[in-house]
Amino acid sequence: MLKLEIITPEAVTYSDNVDMVTLPGAEGEMGIYPNHVPLLTQVVAGEILVRKGSEEILLAVGEGFAEITGERVAILTDMAIRSDNIDEAKVEEARRRAEERLREEVSADEEAVLRASVANSLAQLKVKRRQRH
C-alpha cells in the first residue's frame, strides 16, 4: 500500500491508502507504486489517476510538487478536484474569460496567473470529459 496525500492551500483534498498513482510530471506521466525510489518532482497541470482495488479515481490537478518515498506520495498543488465535482460549464466559461483577457495587454504577473488559470481549466475539462467515456 501507498499513502497518497494531495494538499492544496485550502485543504487536504485527498488522503488514503492506494495501490498506485499516475501523475503528470514535468518529464511526462509517472506511475508510482509502493517501494518507489525516493523522488522530488514537479507536477504540471493535468490529471491524476488513483487506483485502489478495483476503483479508479480521476482528479484534475494544477501545478505543484510531489514528494515520493517508498510508502508515501505527497502532492502540494494549487488545485486538485475530483472529476465528480467539476462543473464543466463553469470551467469552460472561466477558460474563455481567461483566454479573452490574455488577448489584451496585461502585466507579466497577470499573464502568468491567466496562463495558469487556462491550464487548470483545460486539466479539469480533460478529466471531466474522460470520465464520460
Image (cartoon, helix red, strand yellow):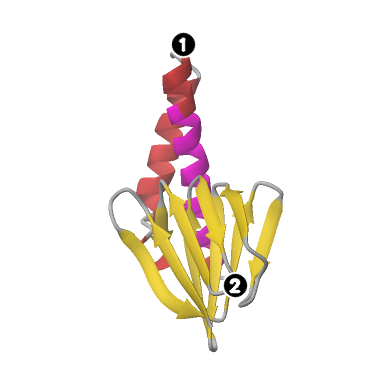
Real-space Cα separation, disc 1 to disc 2, in angstroms? 47 Å
- Mark with earlier residue (1, 2): 2
Residue reaching furthest to the right: 27
Q: Which residue is mark 2?
A: 70
Crowd around label 2: few <14 · some 14–19 · many ≥20 (10 Å): some
Residue 38 horizontal/vertical position (percent): 63, 63
Crowd around label 1: few <14 · some 14–19 · many ≥20 (10 Å): few
Quadrant for the C terminus in the image: bottom right
Residue 68 horizontal/vertical position (percent): 57, 62
Residue 52 horizontal/vertical position (percent): 51, 83
Residue 105: assigned label: 1
Disc 2 residue type?
Gly
* Looking at the image, residue 117 lies above or below residue 1: above
Q: Is residue 24 left or right of residue 59?
A: right
Residue positioned 42% across, 66% down in the render:
5
Residue reaching furthest to the top: 105
Residue 66 horizontal/vertical position (percent): 53, 55
Residue 70 in magenta stretch: no
